[in-house]
Image: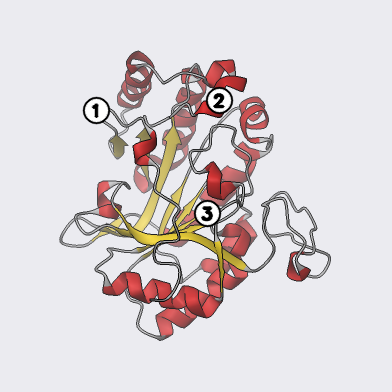
């Protein structure tokens, strides 16, 4: 990375190779906070056996409502080598994982690519999921072609004002759209196995925020008008107002049932058919995994 880091849209220029933290909060060495079977993804990802989720430390966004803030801020995580990461992928496969789920890995992309190539050469055969907040550079994602099978991006905002206010990224909608075009190009239309588990495809997640139903509708308009049945959309109702949200009065409450129902109803009005919704009480810190380094170190 001559001239500093340019992996994400921030293009912060940090000399991460020599230990300087980037905007993501991380040097170039890999840091992982958890690697274990995860059962809380969409049904075609988790299934009964779970998704082999690897949670990377650091993040290129600054979402004030982040549920994984402990690792997003880089305060949790153990340094590992690309070789160890490849071993983790294979260990999760041996545990029966339906897939390998890379959670927020973009700021480590060159090392993740190296680990994926090594693991596939050593027998990794289950699908690989790229789980991202959506703030990615399309030209960086091209390095994952042939290595990633399933794309699981967020599409957080259509409003650049909200993106700046809540994630410090006014260019989020533009960048997320560019990234999504690249993801769909690589994945093509959804493909499933005989159990209904996804083998290839794109699932776009959208978290409904309190007081932001209007923007959620704009998001659905864009996704439906642009992609139709080429993608799935997952409308999330799990916004959790953590204690530090007292500083943000508009976000210091749960999404009401009426707000969520209005967004889901709008998806129906648009004629969207490939949609996941959440039923029941999905709010609470019990849905946030423990970043206890489970599965990170070799036993």
Would residue 118 appear left or right of 73 to someone viewing this image?
A: left
Q: Position of residue 241 (x, y in %)?
A: 47, 26
Q: Residue at horizontal 68%, vertical 53%?
A: 25
Q: Residue at horizontal 34%, vertical 66%?
A: 127
Do tag 2 and tag 1 residues touch (Cβ < 8 Å)?
Answer: no
Q: Is residue 196 above or below residue 248?
A: below
Q: Residue at horizontal 27%, vertical 57%?
A: 50
Residues at marks 3 and 2, CA–CA distance in whole angstroms = 22 Å
Q: Secondary structure at mark 1?
A: loop
Q: Residue 224 appears in which quarter of the rendering?
A: top left
For the C terminus, the quadrant is bottom left
Say which mark, if any, is on residue 13.
none
Q: Position of residue 126 (x, y in %)?
A: 31, 70
Residue 184 in view, yes or no: yes
Say which mark, if any, is on residue 104.
3
Q: Nearer the viewer, residue 280 or 126?
A: 280
- Determine which residue is flagged by label 1: 280
Residue 116 in view, yes or no: no
Q: Residue at horizontal 78%, vertical 70%?
A: 18
Q: Nearer the viewer, residue 165 or 193?
A: 165
Q: Secondary structure at mark 3?
A: loop
| Mark 3 or mark 1, earlier in chain | 3
- Determine which residue is flagged by label 2: 245
| Mark 3 or mark 2, earlier in chain | 3
Q: In the orientation shown, which residue stands out farthest toward the left?
A: 194
Q: Residues within 10 Å of mark 3 (few under 14, many from 20)?
A: many
Q: Disc 3 or disc 2, which is closer to the eye?
A: 2
Q: In the orientation shown, which residue stands out farthest toward the bottom?
A: 122
Q: Nearer the viewer, residue 116 or 64?
A: 64
Residues at marks 2 and 1, CA–CA distance in whole angstroms = 23 Å
Q: Residues within 10 Å of mark 1 (few under 14, many from 20)?
A: few
């Amino acid at each position: 990375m001559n001239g500093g880091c340019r992996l994400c849209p921030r293009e912060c220029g940090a000399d991460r190779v020599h230990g300087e933290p980037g905007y993501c909060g991380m040097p170039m060495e890999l840091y992982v906070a958890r690697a274990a079977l995860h059962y809380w993804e969409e049904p075609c990802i988790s299934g009964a056996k779970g998704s082999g989720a690897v949670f990377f430390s650091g993040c290129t966004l600054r979402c004030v409502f982040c549920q994984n803030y402990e690792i997003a801020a880089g305060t949790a995580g153990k340094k590992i080598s690309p070789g160890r990461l490849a071993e983790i992928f294979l260990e999760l496969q041996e545990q029966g994982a339906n897939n390998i789920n890379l959670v927020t890995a973009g700021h480590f992309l060159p090392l993740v690519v190296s680990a994926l190539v090594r693991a596939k050469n050593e027998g990794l055969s289950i699908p690989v999921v790229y789980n991202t907040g959506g703030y990615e550079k399309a030209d960086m994602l091209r390095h994952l072609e042939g290595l990633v099978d399933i794309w699981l991006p967020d599409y957080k905002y259509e409003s650049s004002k909200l993106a700046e206010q809540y994630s410090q990224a006014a260019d989020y909608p533009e960048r997320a759209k560019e990234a999504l075009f690249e993801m769909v190009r690589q994945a093509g239309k959804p493909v499933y196995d005989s159990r209904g588990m996804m083998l290839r495809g794109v699932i776009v997640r959208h978290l409904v925020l309190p007081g932001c139903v209007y923007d959620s509708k704009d998001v659905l308009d864009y996704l439906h008008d642009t992609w139709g049945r080429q993608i799935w959309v997952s409308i999330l109702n799990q916004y959790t107002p953590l204690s530090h949200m007292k500083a943000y009065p508009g976000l210091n409450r749960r999404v009401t049932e009426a707000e969520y129902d209005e967004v889901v109803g709008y998806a129906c009005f648009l004629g969207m058919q490939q949609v996941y919704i959440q039923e029941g009480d999905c709010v609470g810190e019990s849905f946030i995994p423990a970043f206890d380094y489970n599965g990170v170190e070799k036993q």
